[in-house]
Image (tube, helix red, strand yellow):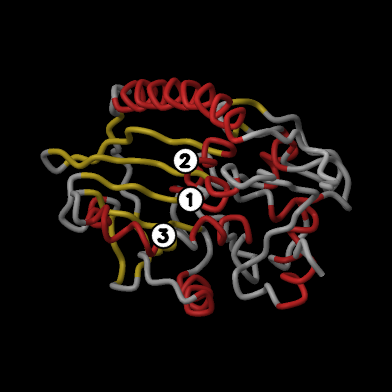
Amino acid sequence: MSTSTHPLGTREQWLAARLDLLQAEKELTRRSDAVARQRQSLPWVRIDKDYRFDTDGGSATLAELFRGRSQLIVYHFMFGTDYTAGCPSCSSIADGFDGFFVHLENHDVAFSAISHAPLAKLQAYKRRMGWTFPWASSAGSDFNADFNVWFSPEQQRDGIDYNYRREAPMAGPVAGQSMQRRGEAGPVAQIAATTGTDVATYTRDRPGMSAFVLEDGVVYHTYSTYARGLDGLWGMYQWLDRAPKGRNENGVWWRRHDEYDAADISAHACCR
């Protein structure tokens, strides 16, 4: 006899419930299509500042990151100047970049990750992770600050604007209310430690993505999203949402892909 606490049923009952779910999924798909059209109808904002980036090919302007395409998508990867390794959450998202960026670039859309850390740090971490996607350093430019993914200690003390809302000033050493629970033992403190930083230093950088278009030699900003707005880009969660137990999370469980080992796998096995 099954000991499952989840509702059990016949194939006929499953099919009836599945057909009900199918209607909800179709409604969600249509709503997602409508939201995409609304996203694409946002007004474009001209970029007049001369941002420069360090890339594998040398110094580049924002327009040069398009690499001959008319559109550019940027992932704001959390890798601050003081980090010793990239954010593990951003690293999990970035694990999918190599698979899709080649398709984007053959559909008139350039792609690049951009981080605040010096290029040499990014290149070393990229080699460690085995990635090939374009990754540029914005060190020395205002790019991260202007697109609300980097904040100074002074801004943290006063309260920052992230994800289109105002965050409360940090209390003591802790910053980033939308990214962590108060307290040095919280999940963000655990993640910060994996980057060689404390909570305040770690949360000075934030994740996000931005889109740009190049028309008649002029770059325009078209869209940016942050925090849970990145959920749809985090590939593993799209799969977990379709797994029998969903995200099934209890604290920070994910790691950089080279930090899992057999012990981790056996600990999560259902039969051991």
Compared across the picture, whether 234 is left or right of 61 comes to right
How much space separates mark 2 and mark 1, taking CA atoms? 9 Å
Q: Residue at x 30, y 29 (%)?
A: 45
Q: What amino acid type should be assigned to the residue bearing mark 1?
A: His
Compared across the picture, whether 184 is left or right of 86 comes to right
Badge 2 density bin: few <14, some 14–19, many ≥20, Cα 10 Å:
some
Residue 201: x %, y % from top left: 71, 55
Q: Nearer the viewer, mark 2 or mark 3?
A: 3
Q: Residue at x 31, y 66 (%)?
A: 59
How much space separates mark 3 and mark 1, taking CA atoms? 13 Å
Q: Nearer the viewer, mark 2 or mark 1?
A: 1
Q: Which residue is mark 2?
A: 147
Q: What amino acid type should be assigned to the residue bearing mark 2?
A: Phe
Compared across the picture, whether 41 is left or right of 117 comes to left
Of 10 and 153, which appears nearest the observer? Answer: 10
Q: Which residue is mark 1?
A: 76
Q: Mark 3 vs mark 1: which is more N-terminal? A: 1
Q: Mark 2 vs mark 3: which is more N-terminal? A: 3
Q: Which residue is mark 3?
A: 97
